Image: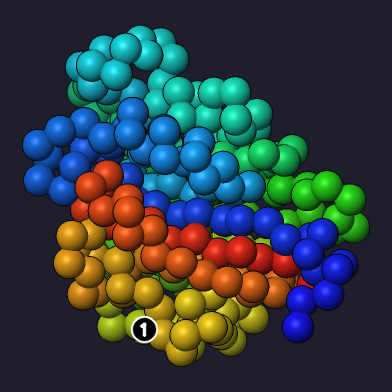
């Protein structure tokens, strides 16, 4: 039963691999539609992967200008604090992970967890202060690699990094884990984290491919937080090749 104190401390988290702002088969730009959808939902925290911060042609198509960048375009007027971590750099731009917040954010540090030269990956760390909460929440946005051996090493690096830079307080790790065999569950549980869908439904959410999800790729792991409800954002299916996922959480 949810008491009045828990109701007061509830907040929503959304995570999405946005596929560089294009639809699953690259037929159309979707960042402008994503901007509208997240405004309609207006979650407290948004964790985005494969956010193409700078690419001149697509930004012109979005009419936001090459100097603005995609993160401020998405966050404008709704999420006053945001952090972006640049991971992959190429001739016409770069992409990485981002965290958007309705609440004050500190840190904004990006850690290189790449295992292969051809596949640049990062761990973005921000610290969110929600309202009158006594303790801030460590927020980590991550996108693990495609190859299982490298992914295991990346997860070890992520957990070592978290152990080094954070205390045992409340924390969220959200993103695309590319973990369709659910190999991350044991090490994450040993580190004190639980996947929000695992808590309430017994299994991580199927999120890929977006139009007919069969693989459990995307996760929101939490520590020191209550999981109130979870949702697959099926109405976002046309925005990316992944489905977005959402969790209503409460401060413990």
Q: Is residue 112 left or right of residue 46?
A: left
The residue lying at 26 percent from left, 53 percent from top is 237
Q: Is residue 102 left or right of residue 1?
A: left
Q: Position of residue 62 (x, y in %)?
A: 29, 19
Quarter of image, res 91: top left
* Residue at 82% in and 59% down: 8
- Is residue 183 toward the left or the right of residue 14 in the image? left
Please report the residue visible at 28 percent of the width from the left and 83 percent of the height from the top.
Answer: 181
Report if residue 220 is visible in the image: yes
Image location of residue 119, percent across then percent down: 25, 51
- Image height of 202 relative to 244, above or below: below
Q: Which residue is mark 1?
A: 183
Give x and y (percent) for residue 194: 57, 79
**Front residue of this view, candidates 48 and 210:** 210
Quadrant for the N terminus, please: bottom right
Nearest to the observer: residue 159 or residue 249: 249
Look at the image and name its color scheme: rainbow
């Amino acid at each position: 039963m949810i008491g009045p104190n828990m109701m007061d401390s509830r907040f929503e988290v959304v995570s999405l691999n946005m596929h560089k702002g294009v639809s699953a088969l690259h037929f159309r730009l979707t960042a402008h539609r994503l901007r509208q959808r997240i405004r309609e939902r207006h979650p407290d925290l948004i964790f985005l992967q494969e956010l193409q911060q700078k690419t001149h042609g697509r930004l012109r198509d979005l009419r936001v200008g090459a100097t603005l960048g995609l993160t401020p375009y998405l966050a404008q007027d709704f999420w006053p604090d945001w952090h972006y971590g640049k991971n992959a750099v190429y001739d016409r731009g770069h992409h990485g992970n981002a965290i958007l917040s309705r609440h004050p954010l500190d840190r904004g540090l990006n850690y290189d967890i790449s295992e292969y030269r051809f596949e640049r990956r990062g761990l973005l760390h921000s610290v969110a202060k929600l309202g009158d909460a006594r303790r801030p929440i460590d927020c980590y946005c991550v996108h693990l690699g495609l190859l299982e051996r490298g992914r295991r090493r990346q997860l070890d690096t992520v957990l070592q990094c978290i152990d080094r830079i954070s205390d045992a307080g409340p924390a969220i790790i959200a993103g695309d884990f590319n973990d369709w065999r659910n190999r991350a569950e044991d090490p994450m549980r040993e580190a004190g984290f639980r996947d929000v869908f695992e808590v309430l439904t017994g299994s991580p959410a199927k999120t890929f491919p977006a139009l007919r999800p069969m693989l459990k790729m995307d996760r929101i792991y939490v520590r020191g937080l209550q999981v109130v409800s979870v949702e697959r954002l099926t109405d976002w299916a046309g925005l990316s090749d992944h489905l977005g996922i959402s969790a209503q959480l409460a401060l413990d």
